Image (spheres, rainbow, N blue to C red):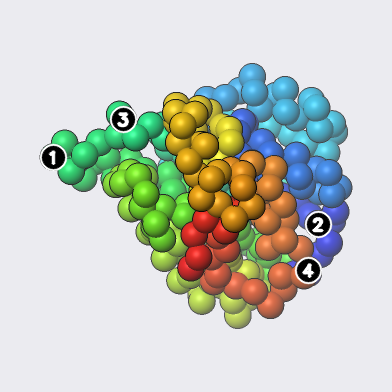
């Protein structure tokens, strides 16, 4: 599938606010039909869809619930058209606050599992639900959202980082399995973003420190990361799969 972005129907998980909202806005700007998935952020999601217009619609679902995701994809197909593109951005409840993070002496496997249910489990559920649509379109685009923390764990958020590292592995193995069907699967790995609900708890001094260490001299914005997602969905990335692109202004080099 090498459709221009303007011909795509894009399902974005966790798109009610923050980075997901920026990704939805970016796709809409290019003319795509946008399915805005949310779990709890109904008001934010509906306001976002209203700002985009009739090419966007909102869909409530917990992506860790396989049946809910099946129903979500069916509703999107009926209302916006069969999905061609998945952006898996959904995040389990998490706050980037180094002061309040769990240390190894208090960390439980259940903490990691809770992150993994959404990061990895959500991707598995979405891929299963989209399987028939990939067949219909003879391909598709899948973009996952990772982190630069598994390259440089400057703050050791153990549960979050472990789940995102597992998501990167799943991105690569899914790319291998789905490649013969014309589906590309890639990851965009951001750093700390200025600013989302998740990063709002980060002290201003940390933002300033990261900005000072970044070659571009500023902390990456959600809008900048969203533009990289567009690349992987575009025909320009038709020969790229199984890759992780770090978008953090050059702070981390893979």
Does the rendering let one see residue 65? no
Q: Residue at x 60, y 72 (%)?
A: 241
The residue identified by callout 4 is 235
Mark 2 and mark 3 lie on one chain; the one further toward the N terminus is 2
- Pick the residue in front: 53 or 137: 53
Per the image, label 4 sits on a secondary structure element best described as helix
| Looking at the image, residue 181 lies above or below residue 199 | below
> Marks 2 and 3, Cα distance to the nearest angstrom?
41 Å
The residue identified by callout 1 is 105
Mark 1 and mark 2 lie on one chain; the one further toward the N terminus is 2
The residue identified by callout 3 is 99
Mark 4 and mark 3 lie on one chain; the one further toward the N terminus is 3
Label 3, residues with CA under 10 Å away: few <14, some 14-19, many ≥20? few
| Looking at the image, residue 79 lies above or below residue 164 | above
Q: x, y percentage for residue 150?
A: 39, 57
Q: x, y percentage for residue 164?
A: 41, 53
> Marks 1 and 3, Cα distance to the nearest angstrom?
15 Å
Q: Single out the residue that lies furthest toward the left.
A: 105
Q: Are marks 4 and 1 in contact (CB under 8 Å)?
A: no
Q: Residue at x 72, y 52 (%)?
A: 227
Can you tell which of label 2 and label 3 is closer to the viewer? 3
Q: Are marks 4 and 3 in contact (CB under 8 Å)?
A: no
Label of residue 5 in the image: 2
User: Which quadrant of the structure image shows residue 167?
Assistant: bottom left
Q: Residue at x 25, y 36 (%)?
A: 102
> Marks 1 and 2, Cα distance to the nearest angstrom?
47 Å
């Amino acid at each position: 599938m090498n459709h221009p972005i303007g011909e795509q129907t894009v399902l974005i998980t966790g798109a009610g606010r923050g980075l997901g909202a920026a990704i939805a806005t970016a796709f809409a700007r290019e003319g795509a039909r946008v399915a805005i998935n949310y779990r709890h952020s109904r008001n934010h999601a509906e306001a976002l869809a209203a700002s985009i217009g009739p090419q966007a619609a909102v869909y409530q679902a917990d992506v860790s619930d396989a049946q809910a995701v099946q129903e979500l994809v069916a509703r999107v197909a009926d209302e916006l058209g069969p999905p061609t593109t998945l952006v898996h951005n959904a995040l389990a409840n998490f706050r980037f606050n180094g002061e309040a993070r769990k240390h190894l002496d208090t960390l439980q496997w259940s903490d990691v599992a809770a992150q993994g249910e959404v990061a990895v489990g959500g991707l598995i559920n979405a891929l299963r639900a989209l399987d028939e649509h990939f067949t219909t379109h003879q391909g598709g685009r899948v973009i996952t959202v990772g982190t630069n923390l598994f390259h440089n764990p400057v703050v050791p958020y153990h549960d979050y980082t472990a789940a995102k590292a597992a998501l990167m592995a799943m991105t690569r193995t899914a790319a291998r399995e789905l490649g013969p069907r014309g589906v590309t699967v890639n990851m965009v790995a951001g750093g700390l973003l200025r600013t989302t609900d998740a990063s709002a708890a980060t002290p201003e001094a940390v933002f300033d420190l990261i900005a000072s260490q970044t070659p571009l001299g500023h902390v990456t914005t959600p809008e900048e990361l969203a533009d990289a997602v567009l690349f992987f969905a575009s025909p320009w990335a038709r020969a790229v799969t199984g890759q992780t692109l770090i978008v953090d202004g050059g702070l981390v080099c893979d």
